[in-house]
Image: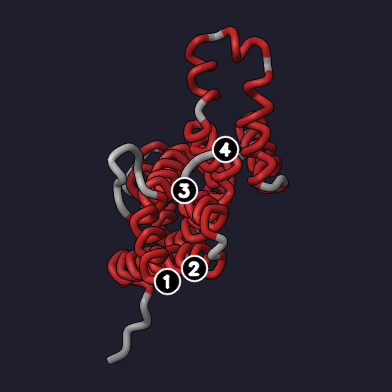
């Protein structure tokens, strides 16, 4: 039993000399998709709250499609559907990109989390205090300066609790990466179970690793909330 657990543990957590471990792959998928989604979501959120229909409607359609369809289907569509198109296979760069299951997984995860993050940030922008906006205008700030220095920083701070939930959900969503043959934690667990038939050990250890990573992320976000949302705390004297 101990030998089996040791083998599983090494496969999950350590470099085996040829490829990254399941944990490293999962964390890389999470960090890459969250980073891309965050960077894209900020300008999209600004467009989402715009009163110009030609600017807000495409973003609304994008978020509706990606929030209204399962991530599993999105990954299958990108990994198998897009590559089946003739013009993709005929283009060297597109062929190289979509042939890789890892690239397809990051693209699917980034597009999915960007849609949810856009709506989270858009809601935070809408709830910006009218007093903050009026103060920025009183100082003579332009629209761009007001959003850059007042609206967006304030909205990102207030969106932090909801965004932390999105990051945790995205960690759990990476379990579908095995569909694209990406060797994440769940893929390692499935391979270990197929090789040893020790289902409880394989999937139990995978669940433990996900739990530890989730607790670590929650702790990081709670610390960030205490720092950046301290001004919202009720002060008692």
- Work out whether mark 1 precedes mark 2 in sequence or the reverse, and give the earlier one: 1
Label 3: element kind = loop
Disc 1 and disc 2 in contact, CB within 8 angstroms: yes
In 3D space, how far apart are the residues under numbered discs 1 and 4 (Cα atoms)? 31 Å
Q: Nearer the viewer, mark 1 or mark 2?
A: 1
Most foreground residue, 208 or 37? 208
- Looking at the image, residue 183 sits to the left or right of residue 64; the answer is left
> To which residue does mark 1 refer?
1
**Residue 164 rendering spot, x and y as whole percentages:** 45, 61
Give the numbered dot on residue 201: 2
Residue appearing at x 46%, y 42% in the figure:
33
Image: 218 above or below 153:
below
Q: Which residue is mark 3?
A: 184
Q: Which mark is residue 180?
A: 4
Crowding near pointer 1: few (<14 within 10 Å), some, many (20+)? few
Q: First in sequence: mark 3 or mark 2?
A: 3
Point out the frontmost of discs 3 and 2: 2
Looking at the image, which residue sits at the far top?
90
Q: Looking at the picture, how far across and down is residue 151, in whole percent?
A: 41, 50
Instruction: Residue 2 in the image: state x and y as whole percent.
Output: 37, 71
How far apart are the two marked residues, 1 and 2, measured between alpha carbons?
A: 9 Å
Q: Secondary structure at mark 2?
A: helix
């Amino acid at each position: 039993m101990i030998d089996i657990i040791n083998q599983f543990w090494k496969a999950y957590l350590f470099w085996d000399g040829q490829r990254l471990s399941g944990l490293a792959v999962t964390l890389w998928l999470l960090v890459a998709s969250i980073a891309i989604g965050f960077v894209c979501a900020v300008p999209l959120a600004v467009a989402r709250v715009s009163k110009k229909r030609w600017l807000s409607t495409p973003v609304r359609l994008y978020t509706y499609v990606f929030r209204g369809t399962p991530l599993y289907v999105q990954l299958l569509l990108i990994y198998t559907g897009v590559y089946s198109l003739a013009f993709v296979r005929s283009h060297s760069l597109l062929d190289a990109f979509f042939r890789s299951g890892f690239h397809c997984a990051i693209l699917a995860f980034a597009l999915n989390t960007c849609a949810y993050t856009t709506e989270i940030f858009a809601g935070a922008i809408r709830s910006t205090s009218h007093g903050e906006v009026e103060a920025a205008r009183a100082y003579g700030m332009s629209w761009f300066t007001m959003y850059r220095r007042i609206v967006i920083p304030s909205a990102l701070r207030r969106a932090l609790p909801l965004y932390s939930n999105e990051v945790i959900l995205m960690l759990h969503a990476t379990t579908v990466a095995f569909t694209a043959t990406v060797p994440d934690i769940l893929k390692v667990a499935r391979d270990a179970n197929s090789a040893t038939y020790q289902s409880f050990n394989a999937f139990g250890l995978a669940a433990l690793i996900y739990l530890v990573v989730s607790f670590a992320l929650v702790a990081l976000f709670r610390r960030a909330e205490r720092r950046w949302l301290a001004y919202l705390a009720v002060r008692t004297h």
